[in-house]
Image (spheres, grey):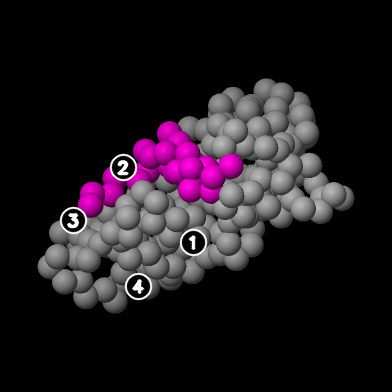
Amino acid sequence: MKYLWTEDTGAGLHFWKLVNQLFFDHALVVESKESNQGILDSLKSLKAKEEDEYYIVFDYVPDNQDIRNKYRQLKQLVEKSEAKIIILDMICFEYFILVFDKLVSWTGTGKMDKIKIREEILAAIKDHRIDLSKIKNQMTIQYLSGFKRYSTERVMKSLVGEFTQNEKWSVKGRLMGECWYKDCCVSEHPDSLRCGKPEIEDGNEKMQMMIRSEEVLRVIGQVII
């Protein structure tokens, strides 16, 4: 069997299940271990069969000391696994959303300040972190300085939340917002937050476009079926 283990729960886990369904035709067993520590604990007690392979979705942002320490432990487990454990090279689920080139047009956000901040932050990503030396715009610097506990992942989660406040696009709940994967795109409530209109309405097509975006494809291209 081929397994994909993720720390993600809720919308993140739902995303990986949709990837398994729409891209891998259910070839993987997708399981949430609920945290980075949960992944480590499961791998430490793992008794893999000869034919088993484990793809690990481990959010890696080196400007978080705890994550950096856990990633070091993960690498040690991988080295002893005889190639049965493969770490997918990714930052975090929210980065997939933030870097998606249709994010602004699909969600219909009118937050021009956040659009500019997003552009500058994405241009400053290097080696799994925001390279602060590349940030020059004062508005972006002020936004980043507002985090009491700064890390690249926290910034991405917060900024994604700015673009997906409409419940139909939200990625904070138990599932991804319906507009990502269902045949819908506008909230039924007239007083809801502004919502965009994707050029396609078919749910599977929209999700396929998301899955086949450059960053997602780069990561899932490591999975051999």
State how far apart marks 3 and 1 are (Cα). Answer: 24 Å
State how far apart marks 4 and 2 are (Cα). Answer: 24 Å
- Contact (Cβ within 8 Å) of mark 3 with mark 1: no
Q: Amino acid at mark 3?
A: Ala
Question: Element at badge 4?
Answer: helix
- Contact (Cβ within 8 Å) of mark 4 with mark 2: no
Image-based side of 204 in relation to 104, left or right: left
Q: Find residue 83 and name its label.
A: 3
State how far apart marks 2 and 1 are (Cα). Answer: 18 Å
Pointer 4 residue:
42
Pointer 1 residue:
13
- In this view, the mark in front (4 or 2): 2
Image-based side of 211 in relation to 174, left or right: left
Pointer 2 residue:
221
For the point 50% across and 60% down, the residue is 14
For the point 85% across and 49% down, the residue is 190
Q: Does label 3 or label 2 sit earlier along the sequence?
A: 3
Which of these two is toward me, 134 or 178? 178
Whether residue 54 can be seen here: no
Q: Amino acid at mark 2?
A: Gly
